[in-house]
Amino acid sequence: MAVDRPAPELTRQTFHLAPRSVWDETDHANLYEAASLEHEGFIHCTDGIEALGATFDRYFLADPRPFVALTVDLDMLGVPWRYDVPASPYPHIYGPIHRGAIVAVSAVERSPDGRFDRLRVIRG
C-alpha cells in the first residue's frame, strides 16, 4: 500500500542495493528480505539513479563484493512503505519485498576507483 508518495513521482525508479552473493542465494520464488528488515525494521531503498550512485559510494565503496540493484515497484509491494524523511529520495519498505514487485535486476558496474559507474540490466 503506497503512502506519502507524491503523484508527480510515480514514474521515478526506486532501487534497493544488495550484494550479488546475497541476491544469488535468495529463493526468487519467495519474498526478499534484506538483513536490515530484521535489524532496523525496514528495507532501505533509493529513488533515482543519481541518488543511487551517491548511496552506493557512501556505503559500499570499500566493499569489494559485486552488487546488484533491484528495481522495485513500490505500488506492487503489498506491505507498507514510506519516506521517513520528507522530501528525501530514501523510501523505507516495512516488510518483505514480494517477487512481483521487483521489476528488474541490474549489476552495479564500478569505475576503476571502485565508485558507482552505471547499471547493467541482468533481468528486466
Image: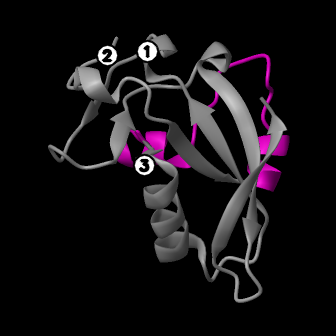
Asked if the residues shown at circle 2 and circle 1 are in contact, with their CB atoms under 8 angstroms apart, the answer is yes
Mark 3 = which residue? 39
The CA distance from mark 3 to mark 2 is: 23 Å
In the rendered image, residue 22 lying in the magenta stretch gets the answer yes
Q: Quick one: SS at disc 2?
A: loop
Q: Which residues are magenta?
A: 20-43
Q: Quadrant of residue 119?
A: bottom right
Horizontal and vertical percent for residue 46? 44, 48
Q: Tell me the quadrant of the picture where the C terminus can be found.
A: top right
Q: Residues within 10 Å of mark 3 (few under 14, many from 20)?
A: few
Residue found farthest to the left: 86
**To which residue does mark 2 refer?**
2
Compare marks 3 and 2 and give the one earlier in the sequence. 2
Where is the N terminus found, in terms of image quarters?
A: top left
Residue 38, x across and y down, in percent: 46, 41
Q: Which residue is mark 1?
A: 75
Q: Tell me the CA gap for discs 2 and 1.
A: 6 Å
Mark earlier in primary sequence (1, 3): 3
Classed neighbour count for the residue bearing mark 1: other residues with Cα under 10 Å, few (<14), some (14–19), many (≥20)? some
Residue type at mark 2 is Ala
Q: Of 32 and 75, which appears nearest the observer? A: 75
| 3D distance between C-alphas at marks 1 and 3 | 24 Å
Q: Using the image, tell me which numbered label, if any, was put on residue 49.
A: none
Please tell me whether residue 25 is drawn above or below residue 28 in the rendered image.
below
Seen from the viewer's position, the closer of residues 22 and 46 is: 46
Query: Residue 112: percent from the left, percent from the top?
Result: 77, 86
Residues packed near mark 2 inside 10 Å, few (<14), some (14 to 19) or many (20 plus)? some
